[in-house]
């Protein structure tokens, strides 16, 4: 609708970055920590997520994300997003609820079985809560793209999925409702598809590296076109559900850096990783195991990502075709690429914790600093803490300020439990000499320093 003359409905908005509130007082924050270990939690990440007030179970395998857990989830999501964007993948958003008819076209409606949550709408139409989105993206693609000139295309979204797992367990690690980043590639031919696949492969190595994880790509299944065109990305953890066999050299490999040229040849990077023996249970080779001898590492792992090349598996039955340079119609070559965003929260805790709680890597920590006022009813102490809180906040340091009227012991325990990288501890005794304590949660290292130098360290 046009504006009426003389009336301006639109006020120009000033550009302002969108950010989460970066400073919180614990007395106001919704952080329902638990002292007791919840009986239902079998693995450490599940226990710690419940105890640290990050999640609340709604029903089996379905969780609410409370403010602290939500912050971590969003941080992980953002790192995943940045690396997808860097690789040339374009973000979009598809719905959670899909029409069954699309899945009938690919014949997966019957194949998927009881893991699929089937729903009817008020008109008795068959719908489902999407366990993945291959059919839906193929449908979008086929109605919009006609020519090879529009290829390649790489699209992704970060959206909730539902799989009615037989045994949902381990908290967010094997949920029924879970957050996935799923990308889809469309190419004219196998060579193009391989380039897209390699881009995602490299983007995954970089993503997991930024999350502080050592993720090992394992050949998951040999494609029909020769070569290995499905990989699971596994991080090693004793509580993992996947059995892993690999050459110990794999553990020394490093992810390619941020300077990676995605338009260059990525094949050498992929080859470097896949040249050394890596396998999961189902695909492991007893002869190779013997040949490796001492170099063989057997371990348990958590699957945090999975990438697939599947050619025309969906494009053919669903008629997603483009015309090639000779005017012939060809079914596009597709791949799909998943990262378990909500699973990663648990996986990172499995990798980084001690007896007292979580040890967040800097990149995903919900706050950078925990500020502890050891004597909230001491006006000098409170004034000093308020001052530090203000300064940290002004400098853009994400800080959680424990200003509660609790005993020091409770504050230490809670702060260790939620695992913020730095603790700034302020008590009346030290304050008399202008001294505060700076503790690094990961190393346990403590330093008594002046308030000013603590600030300098934390804002550097
Ligand atoms: C790839 C993207 C797919 O669904 N379709 C779109 C393909 N692959 S996958 O391996 O089945 O899933 C991708 C990643 O999602 C995580 N994941 C889960 N996380 C929590 N709970 C679950 N029940 C669950 N199932 C899968 C895994 O990290 C997996 O690698």
Image: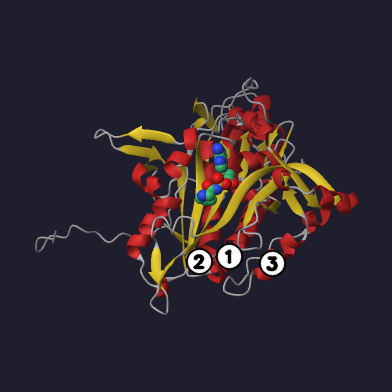
Judged left or right of residue 329, residue 191 is right
Q: Nearer the viewer, mark 2 or mark 1?
A: 1
Query: Of the residues under marks 2 and 3, which one precedes in the sequence?
Result: 2
Measure how far apart labels 2 and 1 are at the Cα level. Answer: 9 Å
| Numbered disc 2: secondary structure | loop
Residue 366: in sight, yes or no?
A: no
Q: Which residue is mark 3?
A: 269
Asked whether 62 or 381 is in front, the reply is 62
**What is the tally of numbered marks visible in this picture?**
3
Work out whether residue 307 or residue 446 is closer to the camera in this orientation and state it. 307
Pointer 1 residue: 199
Task: Judge depth for marks 2 and 3 and give the one in front.
Answer: 3
Residue extending farthest left: 5
376 in relation to 5, above or below:
above
Q: Earlier in the sequence, mark 3 or mark 1?
A: 1
Residue 80 location in percent, x, y?
Answer: 55, 54
Res 387 → quadrant:
top right
Place of residue 235 in the rendered image (x, y in percent of width and height, measured from the top left): 69, 47
Q: Residue 63 location, x and y as percent?
A: 50, 31
* Image mark for residue 424: none
- CA distance separating discs 2 and 3: 18 Å
Check whether the beta carbons of the residues at disc 2 and disc 1 lie within 8 A of each other.
yes
**In the rendered image, the vertical position of residue 43 relative to residue 217, given as above or below:** above
Q: Is residue 284 visible?
A: yes
- Most extreme residue toward the bottom is 326
416 lies above or below 367: above
Image disc number at residue 88: 2
């Amino acid at each position: 609708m046009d504006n009426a003359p003389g009336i301006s409905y639109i006020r120009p908005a000033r550009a302002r970055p969108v950010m989460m509130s970066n400073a919180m007082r614990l007395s106001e924050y919704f952080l329902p920590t638990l002292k007791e270990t919840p009986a239902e939690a079998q693995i450490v990440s599940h226990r710690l997520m419940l105890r640290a007030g990050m999640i609340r179970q709604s029903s089996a395998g379905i969780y609410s994300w409370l403010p602290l857990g939500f912050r971590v989830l969003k941080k992980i999501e953002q790192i995943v997003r940045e690396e997808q964007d860097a690789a040339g993948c374009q973000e979009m958003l598809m719905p959670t609820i899909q029409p069954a008819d699309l899945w009938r076209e690919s014949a997966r409606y019957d194949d998927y079985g009881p893991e699929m949550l089937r729903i009817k709408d008020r008109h008795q139409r068959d719908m489902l809560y999407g366990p993945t989105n291959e059919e839906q993206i193929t449908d979008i693609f086929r109605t919009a793209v006609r020519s090879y000139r529009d290829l390649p295309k790489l699209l992704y979204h970060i959206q909730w999925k539902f799989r009615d797992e037989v045994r949902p367990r381990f908290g967010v690690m094997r949920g029924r409702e879970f957050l996935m980043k799923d990308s889809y590639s469309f190419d004219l031919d196998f060579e193009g598809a391989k380039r897209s696949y390699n881009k995602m492969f490299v983007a995954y190595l970089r993503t997991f590296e930024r999350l502080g994880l050592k993720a090992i790509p394992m050949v998951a299944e040999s494609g029909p076109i020769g070569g290995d065109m499905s990989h699971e990305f596994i991080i090693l953890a004793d509580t993992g559900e996947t059995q892993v066999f690999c050459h110990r050299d794999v553990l020394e490999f490093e992810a390619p850096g941020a300077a990676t040229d995605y338009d260059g040849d990525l094949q050498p990077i992929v080859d470097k990783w896949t040249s050394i023996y890596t396998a999961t249970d189902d695909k492991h080779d007893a002869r190779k195991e013997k040949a490796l001898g001492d170099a063989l590492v057997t371990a348990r792992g958590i699957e945090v990502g999975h990438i697939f090349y599947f050619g025309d598996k969906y494009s053919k039955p669903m008629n997603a075709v483009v015309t090639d340079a000779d005017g012939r119609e060809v079914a596009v070559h597709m791949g799909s690429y998943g990262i378990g965003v909500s699973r990663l929260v648990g996986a990172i805790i499995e990798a980084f914790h001690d007896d007292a709680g979580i040890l967040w890597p800097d990149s995903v920590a919900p706050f950078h600093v925990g500020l502890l006022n050891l004597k909230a009813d001491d006006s000098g102490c409170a004034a000093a803490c308020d001052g530090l809180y203000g300064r940290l906040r002004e400098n853009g340091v994400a800080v959680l300020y424990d200003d509660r009227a609790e005993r020091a012991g409770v504050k230490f325990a809670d702060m260790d439990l939620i695992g913020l990288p730095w603790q700034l501890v302020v008590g009346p005794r030290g304050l008399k000499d202008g001294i505060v304590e700076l503790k690094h949660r990961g190393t346990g290292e403590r330093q008594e320093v002046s308030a000013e130098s603590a600030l300098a360290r934390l804002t550097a």
